Amino acid sequence: MNTRSILFLLLLMNSLYSQGQQHLSIELGGIGGLGSINWETPLHQQENFTLTFRTGFSFIPIDRNNGSALVFPQLIHGIYGKELHFVDLGIGLAPSITTTLGGAYVRMPASIGYRLQPKDKPYYFRIAYTPLVSFLLDLQWEHWAGITYGIRL
């Protein structure tokens, strides 16, 4: 097992046992391409800062030769702010598998956005610039954006 795999497993285990507010979200556009379903849990919390782990799933049609892609975005988010308004920064990896040829590839999604999260409500909204960076053959930067609605579990 390589270092990245061990780090991922430690983060996942920590997130499963964390004692914070977990969220389930639906994102249009964003880190999963056309859209994704995500689960988010806090890893570390301070007064005005929260570090979260976000994992998700997306299904994207590609073309006749490649079929569709199953995308599994995994991000670490830093959320900073008070009361209602937050800056939301994230970076991670999005392993993907094509259904027809079985090819696999990895992209590096990033996220910089605004998060509206009332403390007395069980939901949040986020709007973010979410570039997708591919680094397999050469560096490719795809400009992308996403809108997210999440609900506390």
Image (spheres, helix red, strand yellow):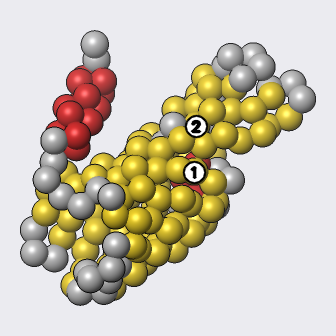
Q: Position of residue 126 (x, y in %)?
A: 47, 73
Q: Identify the residue at image location x=33%, y=79%.
A: 121
Q: Amino acid at mark 2?
A: Val
Q: Is residue 14 above or below residue 124?
A: above
| Residue 30 appears in the figure | yes
Q: Position of residue 72 (x, y in %)?
A: 51, 37
Q: Is residue 30 above or below residue 96?
A: below
Residues at circles 1 and 2 in contact by the CB criterion of under 8 Å: yes
Q: Amino acid at mark 1?
A: Ser
Q: Identify the residue at image location x=60%, y=66%.
A: 145
Q: Residues within 10 Å of mark 2 (few under 14, many from 20)?
A: many
Secondary structure at badge 2 equals: strand
Q: Identify the residue at image location x=39%, y=73%.
A: 123
Secondary structure at badge 1 equals: strand
In the image shown, does 79 or 123 lie closer to the viewer? Answer: 123
Q: Position of residue 138 (x, y in %)?
A: 61, 36
| Residue identifier under label 1 | 36
In the image shown, does 16 or 92 lie closer to the viewer? Answer: 16
